[in-house]
Image (cartoon, rainbow, N blue to C red):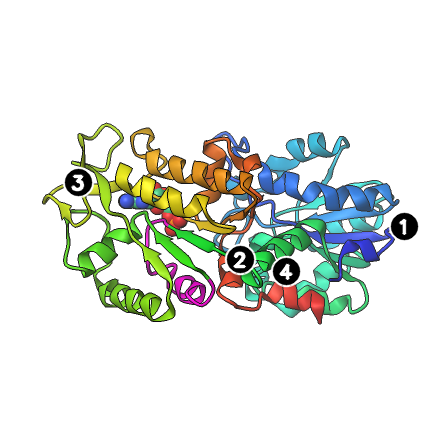
Amino acid sequence: MNTIDECNFKDKKALVRVDFNVPLDKDFNITDDKRMRAALPTINKILKEGGSVILMSHLGRPKGGPEEKYSLKHILGDLSRMLDLTVKFAENCIGDDVEKKAKNLFPGEVLLLENLRFHPEEEKGDIEFAEKLSKLGNVYVNDAFGTAHRAHASTTIIAQFFPNAKYFGYLMAEELKNAEKVNHGAAKPFTAIMGGAKVSDKILLIESLLDKVDNLIIGGGMAYTFAKAQGGEIGTSLLEEDRMALCLELLAKAKAKGVNLILPIDTVIADKFDNNASKNQVDTGKIPANWMGLDIGPKTIKLFSETVKNSKTVLWNGPMGVFEMANFEQGTKAIAEAVVDATKNGAFSLIGGGDSAAAIAKFGLENEVSYVSTGGGALLEYMEGKELPGVKAIQN
Ligand code: AMP
């Protein structure tokens, strides 16, 4: 793999695509800085060798022009503290001002560019925009795993301007190494745990996993569409009516392939979508009208946990219930603990995509599993067997 270990950065100006798309609260404080911390090893290696770093990232979903709430200047203070130096800032990622700032950057200095997505050309993968960005540095590093599945100007198109000077950063390399461990040659038994809101988001992933896993556990909101498809009553639980036939198809496919597909056998129900709703427990498929399933029940926790604990590879994507509400977090928490137990027993556990990374962080178990991916969509697409354009651009 073409990583930054193959380059000596002395006197080089490294143009580094990072994923600093961090969540901010209403006062612009960073509520989770994991993605920034994850890029530090790459930045520090370049600085230590006597190079300078020009950081480019997107933040949020601006509508094609500058928007104060999506300005990367909000993260400048935290970034400076993390790197223990004063990070410079360019108020636009292209143009005279940033070119001058990049030119005057000394070894050991860091320049952060304003949000790339203030220019619609970024997401369009515009080649002229990519070329303008490329002029700012003489080495290109991609460390943005979270956007590696997008063929954007700064993640993919730009690489062609650095035919002999393009590298994967350490985060990208680590993400790919861990995803590969699960994707090919996973130790068995291999168990995938799928959850989250919708089946429709995960169809391709489920189909591709059926060729690899021994056990496929399905919980969360998506499990109710399976229950309904099998003739159960699900009250007002999440339902994707147009996916019911597909659920039956997936069940048949799993059976044909010898995959143990495990669905919830009981559920925690509520009379409204509210942490303070009235609660009850019923068997799957027996939810009264006007009640909704918001978590897996205790029998299911036991069933799922047993399977997880006896696995040698675990991939977890998506919560088992509405874990954001304290009264419905129990199932997700118990499964997180089962993943931790499996890891202690020697399993390789990869968490990522959807909200499972947020869930494991909420329960303070991030450091008790093998790896928590920083990529949502990118990890899922990689697991689906798709080639990530941001990865391919460095390899070519
Ligand atoms: P995803 O991004 O697909 O992983 O979905 C995560 C979201 O699914 C979380 O915000 C959960 O609150 C939500 N979720 C999980 N289980 C349920 C459920 N039974 N009913 C409604 N929402 C759910």
Secondary element at tag 4: loop
Can you say whether 267 is above or below 146 in the image?
above
Quarter placement of the C terminus: bottom right
Q: Amino acid at mark 3?
A: Val
Residue interval drawn in magenta: 195-212
- Local packing at callout 4 (Cα closer than 10 Å; few below 14, some 14-19, many 20+) is many
| Number of dots carrying numbers | 4
Residue at 52%, 45% (x, y): give it.
Answer: 67
Q: Are marks 1 and 2 in contact (CB under 8 Å)?
A: no
Marks 1 and 2, how far apart at CA: 33 Å
Q: Quadrant of ligand 1?
A: top left
Label 2 belongs to which residue? 378
Residue 329 appears in the rendering: no
- Relative side of 253 to 1, left or right: left
Q: To which residue does mark 4 refer?
A: 155
Q: Which residue is mark 1?
A: 11
Residue 157 image offset from top left, x and y in percent? 65, 67
Marks 1 and 3 in Cβ contact (< 8 Å):
no
The residue closer to the viewer here, 58 or 293, is: 293
Q: CA distance from mark 4 to mark 1?
A: 23 Å
Residue 211 belongs to magenta span: yes
Mark 1 vs 2, N-terminal side: 1
- The residue at 73%/62% (across/down) is 1
Marks 4/2: CA distance? 12 Å
N-terminal label among 1 and 3: 1
Q: x, y percentage for residue 112?
A: 70, 44
* Residue found at x 34% / y 33%: 330
The disc labelled 2 sits on which kind of residue?
A: Ala
Q: Amino acid at mark 4?
A: Thr
